[in-house]
Amino acid sequence: GESVGLHLPTLSVQEGDNSIINCAYSNSASDYFIWYKQESGKGPQFIIDIRSNMDKRQGQRVTVLLNKTVKHLSLQIAATQPGDSAVYFCAESWHGNKLVFGAGTILRVKS
Amino acid sequence: DGGITQSPKYLFRKEGQNVTLSCEQNLNHDAMYWYRQDPGQGLRLIYYSQIVNDFQKGDIAEGYSVSREKKESFPLTVTSAQKNPTAFYLCASSIGLDSYEQYFGPGTRLTVT
């Protein structure tokens, strides 16, 4: 899930398949992580969050996994639907500081 | 209906003009933020405010100004000193600075020619 200049990484999945979107975070002291979904021309929407004392958290059709050893965060979307097509980005925070956002990954769902 | 509103959705200005973007929230949140989003990049923090009549510079404050005269409102002015003002601007709010989750408005796309 690292951005490369102006070109966001893109994940294409077939409708009904599971999607896994990855994020490498920068600060080993980060204790809070959040995933947002952003549809074209709209503001980001909260999906799920996780604190550093957990390694997994589940929501409705989504699961976030945290691997602090390698500073890696992933978002799993089960049974991906066309409405899931969007840019997904993670953000991290530490000790109550402001969120720091990644550039994002484009998810394209093929029908 | 609680939420954050930004207006207008699209804004066009000539180079050299100042322009003010509106952000209003009725979530009773203390903290508010302004971000800039450029293609292929993450959100970059311009200014933030923890309480009324107080605000702090973010990472890219040069060429921007804000005010926080009311809890509900946090307008952003893009001045003529901002060298590359064309971008998508997002306003957000949270319960407090130490409350992590931020709620975002729908954004304003500013085009300066």
Image (cartoon, rainbow, N blue to C red):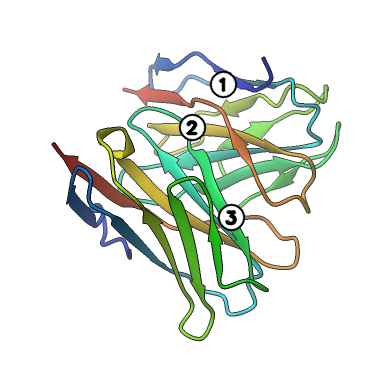
Left or right: residue A44 versus residue A33 is left
Q: Is residue A36 left or right of residue B50?
A: left
Q: Chain of mark 2?
A: B
The kind of residue tagged 2 is: Tyr
Q: Tell me the CA gap for discs 1 and 3.
A: 29 Å
From the viewer's side, name the closer residue of A6 and A68: A68
Q: Nearer the viewer, residue A55 or B18?
A: A55
Mark 2 or 3, closer to the camera: 3
Q: Chain of mark 1?
A: B
Residue A96: % across, % down: 75, 61
Q: Chain of mark 3?
A: A
Q: Position of residue A13 (x, y in %)?
A: 18, 50
**Residue wearing tag 1:** B21
Q: Which mark is residue B89?
A: 2
Q: Position of residue A41 (x, y in %)?
A: 36, 27
Other-residue count near label 1 (Cα within 10 Å), few / some / many at <14 / 14–19 / ≥20? many
